[in-house]
Amino acid sequence: MTSPGELERTLRENLRGEIDFGAAARALTTMDASNYRRVPVGVVAPRDADDVAAALTVCAEAGVPVVPRGGGTSIAGQATGVGVVLDLTRHMNTLVSVDPDARTAVVGPGLVLDRLRDAVRPYGLTFGPDPSTHSRCTLGGMIGNNACGAHSVAWGTTADNVTELAVTTYGGTTHRIGTGWAGAPDGLRDLVTGHLGLLRTGMPPGFSRRISGYGGLDALLPEHGVQVARAFCGSEGTLGVVTEAVVRLVEAPRAPVLVVLGHADESAAAEAAAGLLPYGPLTVEGMAQDLVGDTAARLPRGGAWLFVEMPDEGAARALLRAADAVDSTVVTDPAGQRALWRIREDAAGTATRMPDGSMAWPGWEDCAVPPARLGAYLREFRALLAAHGLRGSPYGHFGEGCVHVRIDFDLVSAPGIARFRTFSEELADLVVAHGGSLSGEHGDGQARAELLPKMYGPDMVRLFGAYKDVWDPAGGMNPGTLVRPARLDENLRFAVLPATPFAGEVARCVGVAKCRTTDPGDGASVMCPSYRVTGEERHSTRGRARLLHEMLAGEIVTDGWRSAEVAEALDLCLACKGCRSDCPVGVDMAAYKAEFLHHHWAGRIRPLSHYTLGGLPGWLRLIARLRAAGAVNALARRVPVPGLDRERGGRLPELAREPFTRWWGRQPGSTGRSGAEAASGAEGAEGASEPGGAVTLWPDTFTQYLNPAAGRAATQVLRAAGLSVEVPMAGRVCCGLTYVSTGRLDRARTVLRRTLDTLGEPAGPVVVLEPSCAAALRADLPALLPDDPRAARLAGAVRTFAETLEEYAPAWRPPRLDREVVGQTHCHQHAVLGDGPDRRLRERAGLTGELSGGCCGLAGNFGFEPGHHEVSVACAEEQLLPSLRAAPRDAVIQADGFSCRTQIAQLGGVRARHLAELLAEGL
């Protein structure tokens, strides 16, 4: 076999695409969305089909295996390998053509499904199969796994929607296959002719979700039309590389209606599902209470639910008349439907977290049985889980008998892995006993291929081997998958990790890859802004988690916490915390980045920005004590601040001449709790009420030294709402955010302990105007000081401005502003705090419109640090800046985050204000 260095040189000489055998590229592709890990020798991003052929020729001559890879969302390990990984997403991601009359499209293998669907939507068309990963899975990956999704009840599997494939095999030979023997490899026709009897009788009785193995092999029978392209689908990269596909499109329903049926329990829902099929549903999805959790309050009464999409309202009403359900609801509003479907789409990640916070894993993610057997199968499946002391929450495509589940396997200890194997073998027997398929849509990979003889028997498995050998006689395509497979308990990704809490956190990332969407957030999503700007895996939440995983493993990334590869990937993490809420498994990359920086710079001189920006509270406190704000502002206009980005002028926003607490100290009654009667202008204000409880107004660094107007306005509004206000000692309380974001965690703990000592027990809620500081107190404080009970108490007392008014002054009526509002919801508010109370407060005040989602791009210290300006501006250009340019001239601009206001001022040229300031003006 050729050495990696020689192979890399030869590939560079023969390809125009990128070839990367470096540690970072290899680390990013060791895993997919499964429990498995295999280390490749290098990664190739071919530019076109000629590059693919060249790569497969070079690798075959060198004896190096090849693994084609799309979005990397496979859950059985088939997108991992020990040879060369072909990344088909970087260049081969085009929509070649659309023929709306013929209802077909020609696509590249790396095209993301949603890009195809967006392109054909104007024609009233769509691609039928739609896995929950539709925003990041690729057409090539869907062909490889024969993906299905929720609408396969109506439109079938990927194999049902593919007409032609261009395929290149190991060694560089090209084929164009469709229906008939034209283009098929030599020997395929003879293989089928010699095994007609076995193909006719050896396959398990057909049903729509028989995906396991080469489950479409009987499509080659003459009575089935010799569908060579159909038989190729589901081959999991073991036969060749798809370089182009012609796919069928279907008419998209114009006004689909969602019917949600509540049933007494899971078995009742499962047994009812098959009876709904004659009514022509587009989807029949099932979930039970243990998966839905608190969101059950938004659903009809019941212990399990069927989500049934019908093509129109008439069909929905007909279904309701026939359905035998405990309760039901009909949702015609598209926004309401999206909200409910989001519960289902996030289930792949939601099911990964058990109620007690422990993790559950894939491995038996998508078994399928004939729909009529589903109720009985689920009862026996639950019993089998209980017998092994395991937990899992089944859900999935009940209309086709396909069940997804994540199970809390112990995949670290020897006894746990042994139980994983025993359970897998017994579950395979159970599925086969019900006439089912080990895989119903995701393929077998390493997770189940070893058990295929249980389903197909030895003769058919030998035929599978002969089928692969016709296409891939040298065995170089994705070896160890489907044919002559690796054992299901080998190559587990957890085995290489140390037994530390941080390793456990990093392992939470199961590769669902919701962070890889290229769509700007729509207010419901922030993650992952740097990936959307760069399009590079290393700048996604998943990519960074994979690099940290390999750093801890030490096999590829060998310099531990000093790793340059990890540092480079984390450098463009904005620490927006979007992944904390948007990632289905709650990966918190901002916290991981802080932990990495803490270790990475331990005992070393840090970047200058860590001292200037990271130590900002201390510097500003010193300047205020010296009463030098004016002099510092004048100096900063002439001399750039060391460590700050020159493209942003090398200076911070201007310091206020009078800090908030100095103003506070001049107010009547400021030494204690101050009643509503002390509020300037509060008497006679619309909606003013009698004084209520006391609130503590937190003097965060940004309000204190940079924008005291927000603090003054909040004081006025809170008093007008009948609340008395007190403010802690100036300069002695701090949330520690800037120290956390720069990884100075020991300093952050010191600051937070001093804060707790100073604050004591807060009287009532602690109102924090700056969302990033509120998020730090609510989330980072108890995480950094887990053994200090005062930390948990303060975190529980923290309220945003809007939360305070909603909870503690519910009868107060805000002034009517009756204006359109634009601006930015702070990403930390989205991720940690939520903005429901803010939306309701704006509505009561007559502020119409929506604030931008996503991230403003400044993100605290990020946008001020050298080298970040381009990404910072690009993030702002996704949603924020376009919304400002499109806003009416009389619209008010709101941004509660100081970073957001700064970005708006510097890039948008307009002034944004805190919601408290807008309401105070109305008083």
Image: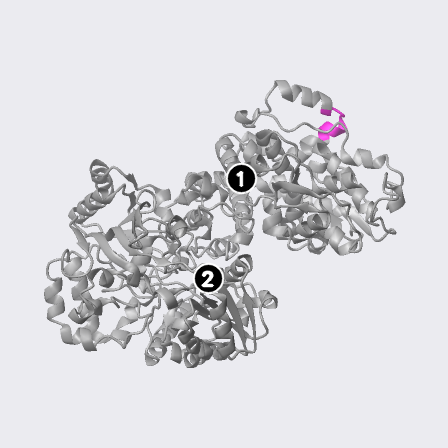
SS majority, magenta: helix
Choose the circle earlier in sequence order: 2 or 1. Answer: 2
Q: Is residue 273 above or below residue 310?
A: below
From the viewer's side, name the closer residue of 155 and 478: 155
Asked if the stretch drawn in magenta spans residue 645, the answer is: no
The label shown at residue 602 is: 1
Label 1 residue SS: loop
Asked if the stretch drawn in magenta spans residue 627, the answer is: yes
The magenta span reads: 622-629
Disc 2: which residue: 348
Residue at 30% across, 66% down: 487
| CA distance for labels 2 and 1 | 38 Å
Q: Can you give x and y, in whole percent of width and height, for residue 808 in the image?
A: 78, 55
Q: Position of 795 compared to 516: left or right?
A: right
Dot 1, crowdedness within 10 Å: few (<14), some or many (≥20)? some
From the viewer's side, name the closer residue of 920 and 437: 920
